[in-house]
Amino acid sequence: MLKISNLSFLLLVLCLSESVFAQEKEQPNILLIVLDDLNDNTGFLGGHPQVKTPNMDALAKEGTVFDNAHTNAPICAPSRASFLTGIYPHVSENFWFTDWTKNEVLKNCKSLPKFMGDNGYHTFGTGKLMHHRVKSDWHQYGIPNNFGPYAFNGKKVVPHPIMPKEYSTNKNDGLFTSLANVPNILEDDKFPGNNGWYDVANRKPFKYVNEEDRDLLNDEQHAKWAVEKLKALEKTELDKPFFMAVGFVRPHTPLVAPQEYFGMYPLEKLKVPVIKKNDTDDTFYRSTFPWTPPWAKHLEELRASYPTLKDGLKKYLQAYLACVSFADAQVGKVLTALKESKFKDNTIVILTSDHGYNHGQKDFLYKNNLWEESTRVPLIVKAPQMQSSIGKRINHPVSLIDVFPTIADFSNIKSSNLKTKNGKPLSGYSLKPFLESPERHDWKGPDVALTVVRGNFKSNKVNEQSYSVRSKKYRYIRYVNGKEELYDNEKDPYEWKNLASDKKYKKIKKSLNLQMNQLLSN
């Protein structure tokens, strides 16, 4: 009996070894590209009729576009902490800029790079990916994030002289101009002054003589690093696949980019978003705060800075779109390097953003709200081996929480994401079924995408936040004070008419509220 058991055990080990070997052979490389503050202002999503994003558009044609993809938290830190750990913000109760590595749930879960590294992948990263980056989660990390350059008075960052005084709110949000507008801060009795841009993160001048003779901007450095890493990997006999994540910081503020990208959007021809007068009269975002948060004042500051609001929006939007096209060019460098490498047919490419951005809609010039412009994100998944998915468009609502399980699924990884029993399992669902059968998919996830905005700055309790769910047709918002908004996005894509008090939509509102509660209770 003992001999049979030993023989059986040996056969089992051999079978498992062959299975693991086969799984490793099937594991593709993964390239994750994350942009910052990018809304639907891309060619393939059509958010702005004049935007130029040829590289992302080409990727969209080669992959599958999720037209109804949304962030789970429409501001940088909680969004990234969520989708790069795979845990909903309400599950971790991480709704703001607190250090996620100290969160009781998230610190007991593996981040995406840690998870991939523990499951047979080389892990490489560069740029802005997670706030409070854990170095040990990566095998190699390239260049840290750097928002600048900035104007500098010899001692500290100061408003750029070209910016209107009313809009010089802070060093990031108060700056939108071409890199060619080199700041000259004159000496005074307190500060020595400085002529030129300054790289605050690295504590050195940022060289700019002209467009051809200058230092590389941070995103250009990330693209260069990723390209060089791909070329280096190609010369190496890899013993396992790689996971590479590239985080581009634009179009996050400060909206500074080379002049050639500003030249793509001449002010006299630039179209601004359609904005309805008194659009906020039937909305309740501002009523949830006992004070007006600084980000809710940006549009008024812009209005005060220019002869008309339209003039201000044109200047701001020109800078935003210039940064979008600049970021697109960096994306193109990385994608071209991949296409020219031996990895092109065995690399899954996923491109997305951490959240969207309002450009005057709902009297808002920022992120961190629950309307479409702020929650909607680009999401492209390219799987070369799935020919039937090429060029497909998916309108089913999905969210960033689904990125982690999608990567795990494509990588054939079945192991747990937990570090300890105090962690939580992945909150999302793999998007792979949409690519396997775009018309008749076997999606296991919810019928709505869930987003949260912090509703109480003194509490992290789940029931003291504001939420929205987005279905194929509707958006339902429930604020912390109980106020509601409901929009028919098919008939009303700008979300101009709040239907929450319309009795004809009572059943729809009740259904969406129930789906929201079900997600929050899981």
Image: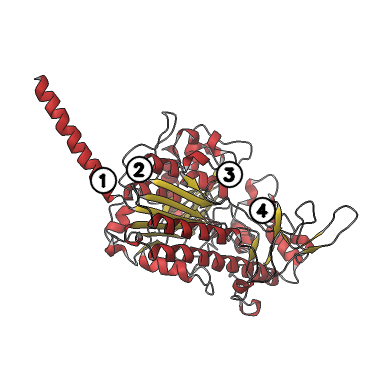
The Cα atoms of the two marked residues, 4 and 2, are separated by: 43 Å
Q: Is residue 259 left or right of residue 52?
A: right
Which label was assigned to residue 23?
1
Relative to 448, is 119 above or below?
above
| Residue assigned mark 2 | 120
* Mark 3 and mark 1: Cα distance apart in space: 42 Å
Image quadrant holding the N terminus, namely: top left
Q: Residues within 10 Å of mark 1 (few under 14, many from 20)?
A: few
- Left/right placement of residue 369 relative to residue 173 reads left
Q: Which residue is mark 4?
A: 295
Residue at (13%, 24%) from the top-left corner? 5
Where does label 3 land, which residue? 454
Q: Amino acid at mark 3?
A: Arg
Q: Return the disc, 2 or 3, that comes first in the chain's sequence.
A: 2
Query: Would you say 37 lies left or right of 172 here?
Result: left
Gap in Å between the C-alphas at discs 1 and 4?
48 Å
Q: Earlier in the sequence, mark 3 or mark 1?
A: 1
Figure label count:
4
Instruction: Name which residue lies at 52% across and 52% down.
Output: 126
The mark found on residue 129 in the picture is: none
